[in-house]
Amino acid sequence: MLKPSSTQRMGSVTPLIVILLFVLLALSGLGYMYWTRLQTNSLPEIVITPVEETLVPATPFAETAASPTPAETNEVGFIQGSLSFPSEVLPPQKICAVNTTTQLETCVEQRQGSSYKIEVPAGTYHVYAVTLDNPNTRAYYSEFVTCGLLASCPSHEPIEVVVVEGQATREVDPSDWYN
């Protein structure tokens, strides 16, 4: 009886190895594409602007007109900044700007990337971030952030961010996760 040679025994295994190598190569390529997409800020930012509604009682002989709201006059500006989180992974976050006068809150969600931009009516705001999985812990843009996030920084007071019509207020980084 003849024994099969080593090349005859390997003949049926070789196509299986080639297929496995091809599948492994394809999966690694897909993994690389997914990883590079996570590392870029390629997703568009979502801007949510609250709708203000003002109800004025009807007065038959009123001589004065109500002053227009910022939404009616298009007096908007922007708040921009960078996000952080005290871990190696930056989780998806919601960033909110709270008008210090009206207490109206405007928020955007940032699921990828480390920068954000919010369109808001001109005014003064406090800005904070929360992770989408734990909305109870807030990181404000505070004096602690501008002091360098050092233990020697004395205050965690939120900073009032002034937004001017048609302009962007930059470097508003809600990073005080330690308040």
Image (spheres, rainbow, N blue to C red):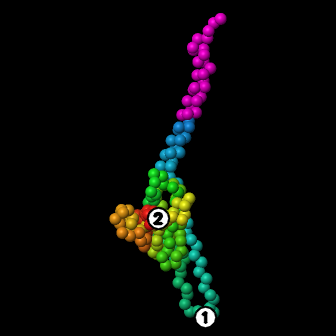
- Element under label 2? strand
Q: Residue at x 48, y 66 (%)?
A: 128
Q: Position of residue 57 (x, y in %)?
A: 62, 87
| Amino acid type, residue under disc 1 in the picture | Phe
The label shown at residue 139 is: 2
Placement of 11 over or under 91, stated as above or below: above
Picture residue at 61% right of the left edge, 82% below the top = 55
Residue placed furthest toward the bottom: 61
Q: Quadrant of the C terminus?
A: bottom left
Closest to the observer: 70 or 104? 104
Label located before the other in sequence (1 or 2)? 1
What type of secondary structure mainly makes up the magenta span?
Answer: helix
Residue 73 in sight from this viewpoint: no
Q: Quadrant of residue 153?
A: bottom left
The residue mark sitting in front, 1 or 2, is 2
Between the residue at mark 1 and the residue at mark 2, the CA separation in whole angstroms equals 50 Å
Point out which mark residue 61 bears. 1
Residue that appears at 53% across and 37% down: 28
Residue 5: % across, % down: 58, 11
Q: Position of residue 86 (x, y in %)?
A: 45, 57
- Residue 13 lies in the magenta-colored region: yes
Mark 2 Cα shell of 10 Å, populated few (<14), some (14-19), many (≥20): many
Helix or strand or loop: what does disc 1 sit on? loop
Report the span colored magenta.
Answer: 1-25
